[in-house]
Image (cartoon, rainbow, N blue to C red):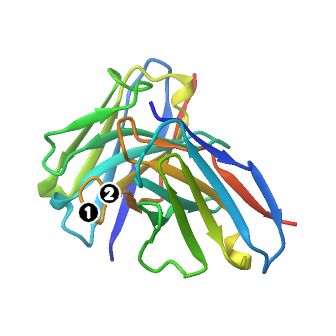
């Protein structure tokens, strides 16, 4: 089955760190660009980060630049988001999303999301 | 940054009616616009890409049109499962951005 499964969410302290992971299966992970998109409670969607299929290109939204780092391990079919210097406004469901079915395409496959709550 | 403005914020319609959702871009994005449907507690689902192309498995009652700065998603006859929130998204330039969403609710 073609799917993305996020894990690693939970409660983080303001100023602290969390790492979320996305496990891909059912498709050739190394052929696709990947992204993280988040959604604060009751709010809309916000794209926050992109990584090219080989990990070479990376882009970030201004809201997370310098604090979050996207990476991937194609051998393990996994995508990561390292979140440092957490703030209350980072509280959201974090989705991993594949860009397809062509290069620089739309988000054609989404995971179920993992909740990150930043609070003391 | 390209800002996408969706209207209306809420659309109250009955099953069987036609729904017309609008998305306006702050600058030209050619046809690089996608539409997504999101139901409560679920991730978004891709409906339309590049303004008018239906994604795999999407019913023909969903159609998209437009180019440049003005785009429309039309649902020709609402089914009970179509009541949800709809987002537009541009891939013309970084940062990738989404509209604020239109909620289609049962009247």
Q: Nearer the viewer, residue A97 or B1?
A: B1
Q: Residue furthest right?
A: B107
* Chain to which mark 2 belongs: A
Q: What residue is at 68 percent from the left and 72 percent from the top?
A: B82
Question: Which residue in the structure is indicated by mark 2?
Answer: A105
Vertical order, B38 against B15 (above or below): above
Looking at the rendering, which quadrant does residue A110 occupy?
bottom left
Left or right placement of residue A24 versus residue B104 in this view: left
Instruction: Provide residue A108's location: percent of width, then percent of height.
Output: 38, 63
Vertical order, B37 against A85 (above or below): below
C-alpha gap between disc 2 and disc 1: 5 Å
Q: What residue is at 80 percent from the left and 78 percent from the top?
A: B15
Instruction: Provide residue A96's location: percent of width, then percent of height.
Output: 38, 51
Left or right placement of residue B106 versus residue B39 in this view: right
Q: Nearer the viewer, residue B28 or B55?
A: B28
Q: What residue is at 74 percent from the left and 50 percent from the top?
A: B8
Inspect this view and state whether residue A9 appears: no
Question: Which residue in the structure is indicated by mark 1?
Answer: A102
Q: Are marks 2 and 1 on the same chain?
A: yes
Q: What residue is at 57 percent from the left and 22 percent from the top?
A: A120
Instruction: Provide residue B101's location: percent of width, then percent of height.
Output: 64, 49
């Amino acid at each position: 089955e073609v799917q993305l499964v996020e894990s690693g969410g939970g409660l983080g302290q303001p100023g602290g760190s969390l790492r979320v992971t996305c496990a891909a299966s059912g498709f050739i992970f190394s052929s696709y660009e990947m992204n993280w998109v988040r959604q604060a409670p009751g709010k809309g969607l916000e794209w926050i980060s992109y990584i090219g299929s080989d990990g070479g290109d990376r882009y970030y939204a201004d809201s997370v630049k310098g604090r979050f780092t996207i990476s991937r391990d194609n051998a393990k079919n996994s995508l990561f988001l390292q979140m440092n210097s957490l703030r209350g406004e980072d509280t959201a469901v974090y989705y991993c999303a594949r860009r397809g079915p062509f290069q620089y395409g739309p988000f054609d496959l989404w995971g179920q999301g993992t909740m990150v709550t930043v609070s003391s | 940054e390209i800002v996408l403005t969706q209207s209306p914020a809420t659309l109250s319609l009955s099953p069987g009616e036609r729904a017309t959702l609008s998305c306006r871009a702050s600058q030209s994005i050619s046809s690089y616009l996608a539409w997504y449907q999101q139901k409560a507690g679920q991730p978004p689902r891709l409906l339309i890409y590049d303004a008018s192309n239906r994604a795999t498995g999407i019913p023909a009652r969903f159609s998209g049109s437009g180019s440049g700065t003005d785009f429309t998603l039309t649902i020709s006859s609402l089914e009970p499962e179509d009541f949800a929130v709809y987002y537009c998204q541009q891939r013309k330039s970084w940062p990738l951005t989404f509209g604020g969403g239109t909620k289609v609710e049962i009247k």
